[in-house]
Image: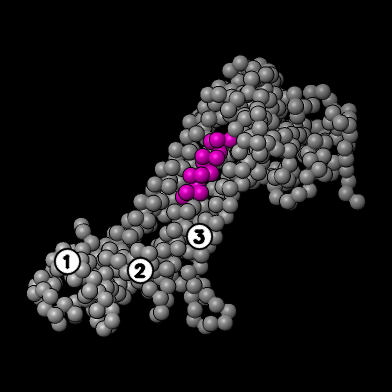
Amino acid sequence: MTATRKETDSLGAVDVPAGALFGAQTMRAVENFPISGTRLPPEFLSALGILKATAATVNYRAGRLDAQAAQAIISAAGEVATNRLDNHFPVDVFQTGSGTSTNMNANEVIANRAIQLLGGELGDPDLDASKRIHPNDQVNMGQSSNDVIPTALHVSAALAIHRELLGALSLLSGALRDKAAEFDDVVKIGRTHLMDAVPIRLGQEFSGYAAQVDASAERIKQALDRLCELAVGGTAVGTGLNAPEGFAAAVCGILADSLHLPFREASNHFAASGARDAALGASAAIRSSAVALGKIASDIRLLGSGPRCGLGELLLPAVQPGSSIMPGKVNPVICEAVIQVTCQVIGNDAAVTAGAMGGVGSILELNLAMPMIAANLLGSIRLLTNAARVFTTRCIGGLRADAGRCHDLVEQSLAMVTALAPEIGYDAAAELAKRAYREGKTIRDLCREENVLSEDELATRLDARRQTGN
């Protein structure tokens, strides 16, 4: 039988595992919400620790916490911030919509760990007053779950985007630009509606991919700035009740200086607590970026199809055997993984959107889907970061072009007749294309047979590289 100790809250006593740093309110939440088995992400818990340590620092500097208590709280919160105490955060993602259970989980863990740091024993009814740390009165001083949880959401998402995602997208964009330069001399056939179109250089195609990634990163940067507005200081409903004057500005100032992002107090605390618009905007920008990666991965997979019976214009790196029954088969598995990530991010964004919607998650003065929004937004950031890195290192970096295959397909394409239309007219060009198809000939060969143009004019008009512009 697991040893327990007694912890109490406003509803009475609760048995808590003896070695757990959490207390009664966390234990009640564990019992109330055995739903998914999924906990809030470590990035979110880290942000909670950062926020609690910062709040304690501000309260100490203002004389509201004595030095001993403040130092113990700051040290304990620092352990939460570095994810050393994640095992003491057992509350399910699907819990009270404000995240109160997780905020109290943090308050209890930090308070109990601070007691240990002061030399006290957990659950000791005779604990000396000098070693007592109260989760609400001291750790949660000047705060409410209703401003702590959205603040932690914004801080964790902003840090993950700034430190991880934007760097991964930059590396991917750079790799695509390198391939654009490497493939600039490879002329291939373009395709619209999956049908042969006029020529394009493979490098031009890849320059488009790089531009897509760059544009998506720019949208994410814009969303990141919105995330830097923090709800801290609004407390329960945005009025700031029980938050001392200057508390929010001081907390935001420390966060901005220490985390190197422009964190600032929300311009309107009622919007900051009642709506999740900034998180929704970030999720939408991340979804857009994921869709861009999915399009690129899908194109590369198609261009590399074959090796003999598909398009075969690209040669993808062989990273693992592709079949348990077909020897020698190699599949575009990295592209497939990226495409699956795209699907998941789209699903995550749909959940965030529903959670931010009025009448569902955002109701009057409070959003009631914050833990779910946090889990999905941070999950999308992590998935997209990792997918971009894998795509860069395991696929894009090793891509090669089959220039011979590209040349042969260009020469066979009936769309080459497009370049003749200004000289011979649209209708005559269309008739040439139909006849070339019926007779199994290239446009060039048929034009020579029919003396449509002189050899020099034909060479100029059907110069595929010339058709692709500068």
Looking at the picture, tell me which residue is in the foreground, 232 or 350: 350
Q: In which quarter of the image is residue 324?
A: bottom right
Residue type, label 1: Gly
Does label 1 or label 2 sit earlier along the sequence?
2
Q: Residues within 10 Å of mark 3 (few under 14, many from 20)?
A: many
Q: Is residue 66 above or below residue 406?
A: above
Q: Where does label 3 land, which residue?
A: 338
Residue 319 - label: none
Q: Is residue 51 visible?
A: no
Looking at the picture, tell me which residue is in the foreground, 369 or 108: 369
Q: Do the residues labelled 2 and 3 touch (CB within 8 Å)?
A: no
Does label 3 or label 1 sit earlier along the sequence?
3
Q: Is residue 317 above or below residue 116?
A: below
The Cα atoms of the two marked residues, 2 and 3, are separated by 25 Å
**Region in magenta:** 276-289
Q: Which residue is drawn at 77% across and 27% down?
A: 134
Count of labels shown? Answer: 3
Residue 35 in the image: x percent, y percent? 76, 49
Mark 3 or mark 1, which is nearer to you? 1
Q: How crowded is mark 1: few (under 14 residues within 10 Å), some or many (20 or more)?
A: few
Mark 2 or mark 3, which is nearer to you? 2
Which color scheme does this rendered protein use?
one colour
Q: Where does label 2 land, which residue?
A: 195
Tell me if residue 263 is in the magenta stretch: no
Residue type, label 3: Val
In the rendered structure, the answer to whether residue 357 lies left or right of residue 29 reads left
Q: Where does label 1 land, which residue?
A: 425
Q: Residues within 10 Å of mark 2 (few under 14, many from 20)?
A: few
Mark 1 or mark 2, which is nearer to you? 1
Q: Quadrant of residue 303?
A: bottom left
